[in-house]
Image: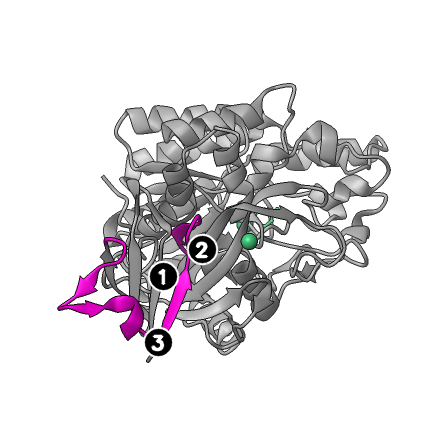
Amino acid sequence: MATTLITGGLVVGATGSAKMDVLIDGGTIAAVLAPGSTVLGHDLAASVDVVIDASGKYVVPGGVDAHTHMEMPFGGTFASDTFETGTTAAAWGGTTTIVDFVVQYPDQRPLEQYQVWQDKAAGNCAIDYGFHQILSDVQDDSLKAMDELIAEGVTSFKLFMAYKGVFLSDDGQILRAFQKGSENGALMMMHAENGAMIDVLVQQAVSAGNTSPYYHGLTRPWQAEEEATHRAIMIADLTGAPLYVVHVSAKQAVAQIAAARDRGLNVFGETCPQYLYLSLEEQLGAPGFEGAKWVCSTPLRSRAEGHQSHMWQSLRTNDIQMVSTDHCPFCMKDQKEMGIGDFSKIPNGIGSVEHRMDLMYQGVVSGEITLERWVEITSTTPARMFGLYGRKGVIQPGADADVVIYDPKGHTSIGLGKTHHMNMDYSAWEGFEIDGHVDTVLSRGSVIVDDGAFLGRAGHGQYVKRGLSQYLS
Ligand code: URP
Ligand code: ZN
Ligand code: ZN
Ligand code: ZN
């Protein structure tokens, strides 16, 4: 296997940055050394196979996107990115690991579904991948399966408080699953929205003829998110299970998480770029059916109410620990269009897997977060949260050589023409101008993106068997 030396860059980690050279041996980081180091009298740059000059650039651990839904069967269709297109797009954007969701619907067996997802992903991924498992309508069978799935490296399970008849588990079912999580160390993930309240509001809106995408936002109010977040926290407290609340968008839900953390509970929150940048008024409220592009759940929140700016603050204070995309793309044509005349039939989801590192870097540019916090919330914490740390999320000897060389002087225009690689006929981020640019991406020592060219291949990506969360106190 080849040896590579990345020279002259600023190596950025969650706890600090320094000008260092990074020596890679095969697929692994061998050493992080003072610039220009010699080893036993040998000039390293002259002894390695490949030298990559990263002068003036940041050298960061590859992004870990812990919430994606490639080819997910949902809303009467399938998320439009396959494991191949979605992981390729991720690579373009500096993400070198995804954790996707195995889906078990009520009439399905969890372990069989796990095998179905392994088969879908095998040989098709451009970057490494792991799995969480969605458990719908929790039964005895699902509880048993949790132990076996942990042995397979699926150490986190997502339950739903919304989508009755599709995903929803009632509070008793959630309690039982959390008891199991408390016993076997699994991290319990929650889609925290009060589905019963939402179902009534949706039915009332549609019967009143309020059918445009804007009403998707109005019928999933922050009260439904705050209430469900609180309820999930109470069940976590009662059972002792660690809780990770996915796609947090409401500032009131953040307050619930912060209060739980202040009480010493292992309760964590994830947000997504859409909740930091986009809003109910500007995107969901776009003219005609345009707002369908941004229909996702939890929904985009009102900017007038200040959710977006509060979310940036929460990232600074660690009330929210990390940023994933919840990448769940659907095309407008034939997919989002299923909801013309009835917003409740618009498949829920936004595609962003390619843009997370760039979008979050804008927080560094604008002074919302530090350079180190950028790496922490996009790579290091996701790795620790989901039992990947050491191999992923850090540049240190022994870690997988998943490395991004990021050019702060570069520029990226998102979503205009063919500038993105996600399998979508639009971009939720069209028109965003990004300061910064992903120049080079290495996955386990192989250069998979360089200077505007994709050099990776489907099948390079390997399944990563995850351990238990490394983030618990
Ligand atoms: O709208 C969303 N978030 N779609 C993906 C499924 C989920 O609830 O995460
Ligand atoms: Zn969800
Ligand atoms: Zn999701
Ligand atoms: Zn560049």
- Residue 325 visible (yes or no): no
Crowding around mark 3 (Cα neighbors within 10 Å: few <14, some 14 to 19, many 20+) is few
Q: Position of residue 101 (x, y in %)?
A: 49, 59
* Left/right of residue 438 with respect to residue 288 in the rendered view: left
Q: CA distance from mark 2 to mark 1?
A: 9 Å
Query: Which of labels 2 and 3 is toward the front?
Result: 3
Q: Which residue is mark 2?
A: 405
> Is 431 positioned to the left or the right of 287 in the image?
left
Label 2 sits on a secondary structure element that is strand
List x then y, in percent, for residue 161: 52, 41
Q: Residue at x 54, y 24 (%)?
A: 309
Name the N-terminal-most of marks 3 and 1.
1
Q: Amino acid at mark 1?
A: Ile
Does dot 1 land on a helix, a strand or a loop? strand
Which residue appears at 34% of the width and 77% of the height?
2
Q: Which residues are magenta?
A: 34-62
> Is 350 one of the magenta-colored residues?
no
**Quarter of the figure that contains the C terminus:** top left
Q: Which dot marks residue 168?
A: none
Residue farthest along the left direction in this orientation: 40
Cβ atoms at labels 2 and 1 below 8 Å apart: yes
Instruction: Please name whichever residue, 473 or 417, is drawn nearer the observer in this view of the structure.
Output: 417
Labels 2, 1: front one: 1
Instruction: Say above or below: 19 vs 105.
Output: above
Q: Give the image location of residue 174, x and y in percent.
A: 41, 45
The image's mark for residue 6 is 1
Cβ of disc 2 within 8 Å of ligand 4? no
Q: Nearer the viewer, residue 373 or 55?
A: 55
**How many marks are shown on the rendered structure?**
3
Residue at which label 3 appears: 49
